[in-house]
Image (cartoon, rainbow, N blue to C red):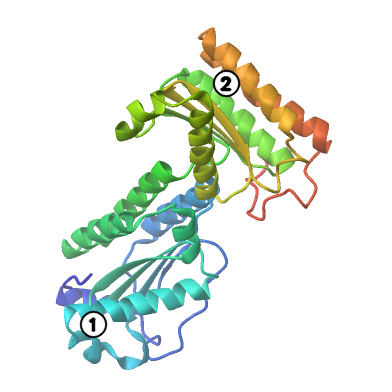
Amino acid sequence: MVFPLRRAALALIVGGWLGAALPAHAAGPEVKDQAGFFSAATVQKANDELKAIQRLYHAEVLVETFATVPNNKAELVKAMGAAERERFYAGWVKERILAAGDKGIQILITKQPGHAQVGLSDEIKKRQAFTQKDRDDVTNALVADLRKNDADAGLLDALKLVRERLDVHVPAANEARDRAHFFSPAAVQRANEALRDIHQQFKIDVMVETIESVPADRVQAVEAMSKEERDHYFVDWVKRRLTAAGGEGIEVLITRTPHHIQIREGPQTTGKAFKDADRHHLRDLLVSRFRAKEYDDALAAGIDDIRKSLQTNLGAGAPPSVARTTPAPAARS
């Protein structure tokens, strides 16, 4: 999306890049502000946010700014119509995504011409972790601030929106998301500490989320289902949630309307790290505590039950065959 630039902003163009080969992507998510849009403090805040997004949602967000388009084509691109320019930048963003391994979300900004483009990798689309509407909303938020000549706010607002939208579609890894408000804040905090410890020891993600209701337009239909039909509905739902999270680990999904608890493991986790008997035992434990309305105790006991199952099945830690390829969090002091 195009945004106008004030003449004074041109002085910030980084010399020596124009016409050079595009730089390779660095490993991991980061801001590469080659055009000098952002302050050092904003870049640091943004990089911290990018690391948190990767840790929680296994989504790499890459931010790159350029002084101009490649190969001295600025005047040519300026002369393009809106649709043609959009295709040009979409193709460029796609190239940058492929250079990064076709994963994650790419935010690309140029000064001459002034333009911001957000692209999604095939991997993110397949996971349904971020939608085209999400992409458009992030682009619009970024451009609105850039048009006000506030690039720092634009970057931080865009990343805040990226995180909010990912949190809707993707279960947070190794954190409890209590959207249905079953648990006390203290219980959630203790649960999150325990989940991070489990991940550190076994390199397996555990996602615990409570949701107030199935989609509003499905409530009556789901409540009218037979037990078998309802179980099938929730199995499909939790499978989609696990896929959005990257496909591995253990997902615990709890809804208030209708009351239901569903658990699923990824293909590398099931059968070895977490067995069918472990899943059934965990579900029975949670159902019993929830029926007694012992919600905080259910959360603590459920996470402890997962830990015990992993300890029994894996011993001291996870073998390479079941460990995620994403980096583990830093060791806790």
- Asked whether 39 or 106 is in front, the reply is 106
Q: Is residue 275 left or right of residue 135?
A: right
Name the residue type under label 2: Leu
Name the residue that disc number 2 marks. Answer: 299
- State the image quarter where residue 13 is shown: bottom left
Q: Image quadrant for the C terminus?
A: top right
Q: Which mark is residue 84?
A: 1
Image-based side of 34 in relation to 317, left or right: left
Which residue is located at x 37 percent, y 79 percent? 91
Separation of residues labelled 1 and 2 (CA atoms) = 53 Å
Q: Is residue 50 above or below residue 241?
A: below
**Amino acid marked by disc 1:** Glu
Work out whether residue 150 can be spotted: no
Report helix, strand or loop for mark 1.
helix
Residue at 30% of width from left, 51% of height from top?
Answer: 157
How would you rate the neighbour count of disc 2 (Cα within 10 Å): few for under 14, some for 14-19, many for 20 or more?
many
Question: Which quarter shows the N terminus?
Answer: bottom left
Residue 235, position as x, y percentages in the image: 54, 36
182 to 262, vertically: above or below: above
Q: Where is residue 247 in the image (x, y as percent from the top left)?
A: 59, 49
Residue 251 shows in the view:
yes
Mark 2 or mark 1, which is nearer the start of the sequence? 1
Residue that appears at 75% across and 40% down: 271
Question: Where residue 107 is drawn, which disc sits there?
Answer: none
Does residue 249 sit above or below 102 in this rendering? Answer: above
Q: From the viewer's side, name the closer residue of 241 and 312.
A: 241
Residue 232 appears at what percent x and percent y? 52, 35
Find the residue positioned furthest to the right.
315
Q: Say which element carries label 2.
A: helix
In the picture, residue 308 is in which quadrant?
top right
